[in-house]
Image (spheres, helix red, strand yellow):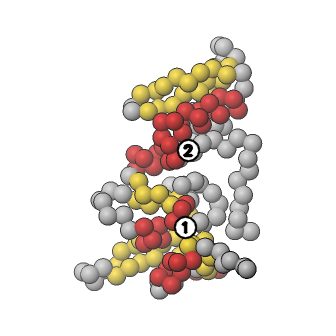
Amino acid sequence: MNKAKPWCKIEIKDGIKVKIDQEDRERVQEHSWRVQRSVKHGKPRVVTSILNKTGSYRTMTLGQFLLKPRKKGLQVFPRRYQTSLDYRKANLIVCDMKQRQIMLPKRKSKNATSIYKGVSYIKAKNTWRARIEYGGKQIYIGDFDSESKAALAYNRTAKKYYGDIAYTNPINRKIIDRNK
């Protein structure tokens, strides 16, 4: 017996495909969706304009539309940064901006000594140091003989302190574009 997939891809404006749960297909297709890129980082998000009770239009992301966060200040984000537009509920998380910072990858900096979040090179010791911020304080994890070992130590510690929402460094794994 051939079981149907619990998710599907829908086509939005400009032929772009978005992955959603099968159960949301009808409701999502009642609206016209488009991809909007953030001004600062150029990251794509899927949005629509919805008519309010007051008669004005409000731009709403597909994540907000699907999960409908009730509390003010909460937003919906994908769990991991990736190139595909994956709006399945299992890939979305409702959080505030402070929680969101925990899930973000390392910021690009020309002065950075490591490509990994929470890792820096200590020239005087010729080692790689792993640290994490928790509760507003820097926590020393340890010094390591390789950048990847320090990144793995950061990953373990991030999961310990932040659980499922922790960003983990992509070590020895490729980010796959599933849109292709």
> Is label 1 in a helix, a strand or a loop?
loop
Give coordinates of residue 33: x percent, y percent: 51, 78
Q: Residue at x 57, y 72 (%)?
A: 20
Q: Is residue 59 above or below residue 82?
A: below
Q: Is residue 124 above or below residue 86?
A: above
Under mark 1, the amino acid is Tyr
Q: Is residue 156 above or below residue 13?
A: above
Residue 39 can be seen, yes or no: no
Viewed as shown, does residue 61 lie left or right of 8?
Answer: left
- For the residue pair 89 and 77, the one nearer the viewer reads as 89
Under mark 2, the amino acid is Tyr
Residue 59 can be seen, yes or no: yes
Earlier residue among tags 2 and 1: 1
Q: Is residue 69 above or below residue 97?
A: below
* Residue that protrudes farthest toward the left in the picture: 54
Q: Which mark is residue 87?
A: 1
* Residue at image mark 2: 167
